[in-house]
């Protein structure tokens, strides 16, 4: 069992922390053996597994919270604050209950003698392999603060990169979703009422109006089946892209979408270069670094290329030669990396590559927003025009027959 305590040392200073013991009496005895006078000792309450799982599902830990965690931790460690005290301080300040639970568990593990990297590795849903490897390298080299600062910078850049993509696609996604909802309401509720007027008047109806009438009547009568079918299709699609084959195919399809494919290429290359540069600067061997980066690029197409590069380096080759044969990496990238390999400045070259493609991502996201807006407006206008034309023509026929 673990007990929280508050005690005084021989100098009269207050000490707080936790200690592992079989009972409160044993905990008091252990504190006294350390020349501490206990003020209070109480058993810590463990977070039940079901509560922890619900916290993970409800809140999780996003990139912004992770970047704030590493930045605050780097600042405290730089100020010579111990890792346990730093983690407690960061945990007290975070508003994310799940992250606070994870930090509390890491503190307990570290107090039991586990290294910081080992405590992080127990929570792979929060701390990826890249973060664990960087912290482990910092522990081995004796420069933990530098590793945490690297992770803080890296998390912030990844967060900014993801934010750019979301901001570029937020407006088109909202307009597209709104158009689907409004169109569904029009076809199921509004259109059947208008077309019933044409039936009662027994006037000649053009074929395109007849098609809309039948579609509106079908959707009005079987809207529940359409909604259920849409949910089933969406669920099957999500399930399929989570499988290995489905994810591979979906990644290839995304890369072939006009405009979106170019944006994703810049994002993946920037993410690859940035993370690999950080790992190499942190002292991670290049083969291990490539394997780690392949897992964080978030694209099966790039993952396979990077793993082939790791195999090539393992047998004494150059990763630039693998990239040169790949269609995922532009020739300029492989040439720049080759220059870095020849000069022994791979990390610096990768940083330049990351900076360039980050700027390209900015440019494409700005252009994407400018291009998609008129395209969406045009498509919506065409849809509304077809709907209005199909309704107005019969109305003119009615007016002409009066």
Image: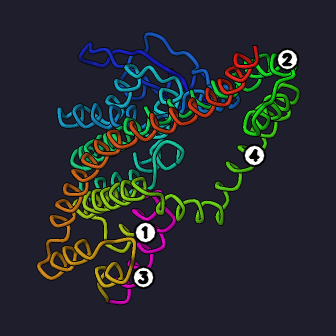
Name the residue beneath numbered marker 4: 233
Question: Nearer the viewer's eye, disc 4 or disc 3?
Answer: 4
From the image, give the main secondary structure of the stretch colored magenta: helix
Q: To which residue does mark 2 refer?
A: 201
Q: Are marks 4 and 2 in contact (CB under 8 Å)?
A: no
The location of residue 185, given as percent across then percent down, is 70, 22
The one of 295 and 28 positioned closer to us in this rendering:
295
Magenta residues, as a range?
Answer: 291-316
- In the picture of the structure, the residue carrying the numbered disc 3 is 311
Work out how far the residue at label 1 is from the one at label 2, CA to CA, in angstroms: 72 Å
Residue 205 rendering spot, x and y as whole percentages: 78, 31
Number of residues whose C-alpha sits closer than 10 Å to that of mark 2, classed few (under 14), some (14–19) or many (20 or more): few
- Is residue 46 positioned above or below 241 on the image? above
Foreground label between 4 and 2: 2
Q: Is residue 196 magenta?
A: no
Alpha carbon separation for disc pair 4 and 3:
39 Å
For the N terminus, the image quarter is: top right
Q: Is residue 259 above or below residue 338?
A: above
Is the Cβ of the residue at disc 3 closer than 8 Å to that at disc 1?
Answer: no
Q: Earlier in the sequence, mark 3 or mark 1?
A: 1
**Residue 301 within the magenta-colored segment of the rendering:** yes
């Amino acid at each position: 069992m673990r007990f929280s305590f508050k005690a005084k040392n021989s100098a009269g200073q207050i000490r707080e922390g936790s200690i592992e013991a079989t009972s409160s009496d044993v905990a008091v005895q252990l504190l006294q053996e350390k020349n501490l006078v206990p003020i209070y000792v109480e058993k810590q309450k463990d977070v039940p597994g079901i509560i922890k799982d619900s916290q993970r599902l409800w809140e999780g830990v996003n990139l912004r919270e992770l970047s704030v965690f590493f930045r605050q931790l780097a600042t405290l460690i730089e100020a010579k604050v111990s890792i346990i005290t730093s983690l407690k301080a960061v945990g007290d300040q975070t508003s994310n209950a799940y992250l606070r639970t994870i930090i509390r568990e890491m503190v307990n593990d570290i107090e039991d003698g586990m290294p910081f990297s080992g405590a992080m590795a127990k929570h792979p849903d929060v701390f990826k392999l890249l973060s664990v490897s960087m912290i482990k390298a910092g522990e081995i080299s004796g420069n933990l603060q530098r590793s945490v600062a690297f992770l803080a910078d890296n998390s912030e850049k990844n967060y900014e990169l993801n934010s750019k993509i979301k901001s570029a696609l937020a407006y088109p996604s909202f307009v597209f979703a709104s158009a689907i909802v409004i169109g569904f309401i029009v076809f199921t509720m509004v259109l059947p009422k208008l077309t019933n007027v044409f039936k009662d008047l027994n006037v000649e109806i053009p074929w395109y109006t007849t098609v809309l009438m039948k579609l509106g009547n079908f959707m009005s009568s079987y809207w529940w089946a359409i909604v259920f079918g849409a949910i089933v299709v969406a669920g099957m699609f999500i399930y399929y892209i989570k499988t290995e084959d489905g994810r591979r195919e979906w990644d290839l399809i995304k890369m072939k979408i006009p405009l979106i494919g170019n944006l994703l290429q810049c994002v993946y290359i920037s993410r690859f270069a940035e993370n690999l540069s950080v790992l190499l600067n942190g002292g991670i061997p290049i083969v291990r670094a490539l394997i780690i980066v392949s897992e964080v690029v978030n694209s099966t197409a790039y993952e396979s290329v990077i793993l082939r590069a790791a195999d090539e380096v393992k047998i004494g080759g150059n990763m630039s030669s693998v990239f040169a044969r790949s269609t995922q990496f532009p020739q300029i990238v492989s040439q720049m990396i080759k220059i870095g390999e020849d000069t022994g400045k791979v990390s610096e070259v990768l940083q330049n590559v990351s900076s360039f493609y980050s700027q390209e991502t900015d440019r494409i996201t700005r252009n994407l927003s400018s291009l998609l807006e008129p395209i969406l407006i045009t498509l919506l206008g065409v849809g509304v025009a077809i709907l209005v034309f199909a309704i107005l023509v019969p109305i003119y026929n009615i007016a002409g027959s009066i």
